[in-house]
Image: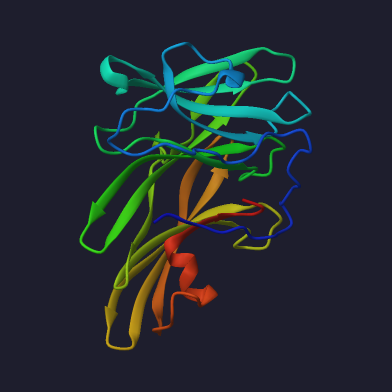
Amino acid sequence: MLLLAGCSGPRAHAPSAAASPSPSSDGIEDGAPCPPAPAELGLPDDAGCASAASGIFSPAPRGTDLISYALVGEEGYPRRWRLRVMRPDGEWLEEPIYAGSATSYPRLLGTADANDDGSDEAFVKVATHSYHSGATHEIAIFGVRPRDIYRVQIDGRPSLFQVGGVSTFGEGVECRDVDLDGDPELVLLRIDFVFGEIQRFSERVYEWEGTGLRFSSRREGRMAKTGYNDPLLYRYYSLRCFDF
């Protein structure tokens, strides 16, 4: 299960009143034929497995719909995946998503202004890896410019990080102003090892540079083992980005 948690902060913003439900992916079942996309989304006739969210993307000052969907082939199975932005004026942008597999379908999880530039970023689950008693989910970040949709780069490579895990190992991500300079960073959290009642953890901090991220610092330490409902531990298994 992918754990999502909201958290307030100086960079949080309220969702647009005109926004569509966010996120929504009802009826999508990994490995199964895609349910047809709702007609109101205005997608191609062969579209399916649609998930939708809403956000505020420059230069539009109002809420904008963001949709992930598949172009389906024989018997309704996905052939290609697309990410579409529907602007308030009726115009739209679209880019391919190179993600998914026969048993794991991409999902649009939601949006947040992760770098505090006034325009939201979209968080997309691009793959899931299931194993004994647990799963990890690979997440990518996408941004929207006036003329295109782009995948955020981390140290010059397409963004990809993991969220989830099991009781002895976990990975999480959060947006946080680590150095209290007024600018948010992206922090990758990890439970590296559990021995008895002691957990070893690490945190990698990435700073925003324009529309990309670069590694800044790393710290590690130990903490007492706690329950999953403890906020201190929950961070290491979840995705938290301000109001998303």
Q: Nearer the viewer, residue 206 or 47?
A: 47
Above or below, 127 against 68 in this view is below
- Horizontal arrangement in the rendering, residue 174 relative to residue 31 (left or right): right
> In the picture shown, does residue 66 fall above or below 178?
above
Residue 24 in view in this figure: yes
- Is residue 220 shown left or right of residue 147? left
Kindly indicate the quadrant of the structure image that contains residue 188: bottom left
Residue 118 image offset from top left, x and y in percent: 72, 37
Q: Is residue 188 visible?
A: no
Residue at the location (34% across, 85% down)? 198
- Left or right: where 192 falls relative to 5: left
Q: Can you say which quadrant of the picture contains the N terminus?
A: bottom left
Residue 224 drawn at (x, y percent): 41, 86
- Residue 54, image x, y percentages: 64, 35
Q: 20 or 219: nearer the eye?
A: 20
Residue at x 32% of width, y 54% of height? 136
